[in-house]
Image (spheres, rainbow, N blue to C red):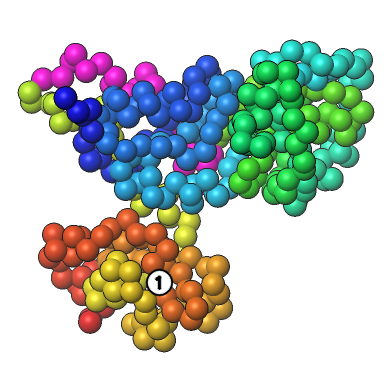
Amino acid sequence: MGRKRGRDIDGWLILDKPLGPTSTDMVNKLRWAFDAKKAGHGGTLDPLASGVLPIAFGKATRTIPYIMDATKRYRFTLTFGESRTTDDLEGEVLAMSPNRPTDEQILAALPALTGNVMQVPPVFSALRVGGERAYDMARAGRPPELPPRPARIDSITLVERPDADTAVFDVQSGKGVYMRSLARDIALACGTVGHISVLRRTKCGPFDLSHALTIDQISLDKSTQTVDNADALPAPLLDAATALVDIPALAVTDAEGRVLVWGQSIDPSDLVHPLPASSQGEDHLWRAMIGEHVLGLCHVRHGRLRAARMLENHEFFGEHDVDYRRTPHGTDF
């Protein structure tokens, strides 16, 4: 008998990930709970990190790259005096220092670590080196030399000093920034060593802790299912297009939407709602909408407006016989 493939479920679940399990552990657990055919997450959190973990089902998985690229916020506690193999509490002690920086020393070090910087990733990371994961090499006693990588750190705020040994920071950053590396670098810039002892992600793209559910708030016990509630989801999902709300909207007509969904292109000058002249660059993304419904993303390539990533396919137009001319963003076509 073949493996059951699961249900077609579309949307986002924002999990407040607990300490301990990996991000993949949580995706697998929730995919089973929702009996979902397809699922993935929008940005890894370490086992010793908690907080906002966006989990995508079905069509929402098509928007994962935009969540991965989105701005994120973290709050972490840096413990001074010990560097560790993993740059967090889990690792073995590598070096010790009696130096404890003052608030003034910390604040003086932060500007050099903010903006577009070069950052050396933690040795215990999922980066591949010669086909192997860096953390596998480190665990085997062969820690790799990882070169610095470009990173964008928008802001670092010193929130509090609970005591001389610790400092709490709030950080806003772009894609691929390692908070463990940042904590290590702050300590080094202050003339000491250190590691992250607490890490929590508070925002990931448009999702923050106000959207998040704990694992205890999600119904995982399938034994309580009955014939009447067999199709009920263990928790409500956010619409798949929620991940794209930060991308500017472009109203398209039914006819224009069909062209984009079918993979064809449009001369921007022929659009009923023209693109602003200042926003027709090849790197600019638009959220194509018919009325209040998001079809997907489009962009200009080689002078033509084309689909970048669609949430809908041609079946949408056959199954949704709606007069979009009457909707707030619709137009005659």
Residue at the (28%, 68%) spot, across then down = 262
Question: Above or below — where is 218 with respect to 171?
Answer: above
x, y (%) of residue 101? 89, 25
In the image, residue 254 lies in the stretch drawn in magenta: no
Q: Is 70 on the left-hand or right-hand side of 35?
A: right
Q: Amino acid at mark 1?
A: Arg
In the foreground, 264 or 105: 264
Q: Secondary structure at mark 1?
A: strand
x, y (%) of residue 313? 25, 60
Q: Which quadrant is the N terminus positioned in?
A: top left
Residue at the (21%, 75%) spot, across then down = 325
In the foreground, 248 or 20: 20
Q: Quadrant of residue 109?
A: top right
Residue at the (24%, 76%) spot, across then down = 255
Looking at this view, name the residue that lies furthest to the bottom.
Answer: 269
x, y (%) of residue 276? 49, 79
Residue at the (25%, 71%) spot, across then down = 258
**Residue 45 visible (yes or no):** yes
Residue bounds of the magenta highlight: 203-226
Question: Above or below — where is 66 with respect to 222?
Answer: below
Quickly name the residue at label 1: 306
In the image, residue 222 lies in the stretch drawn in magenta: yes
x, y (%) of residue 69? 55, 49
Q: Is 143 on the left-hand or right-hand side of 74?
A: right
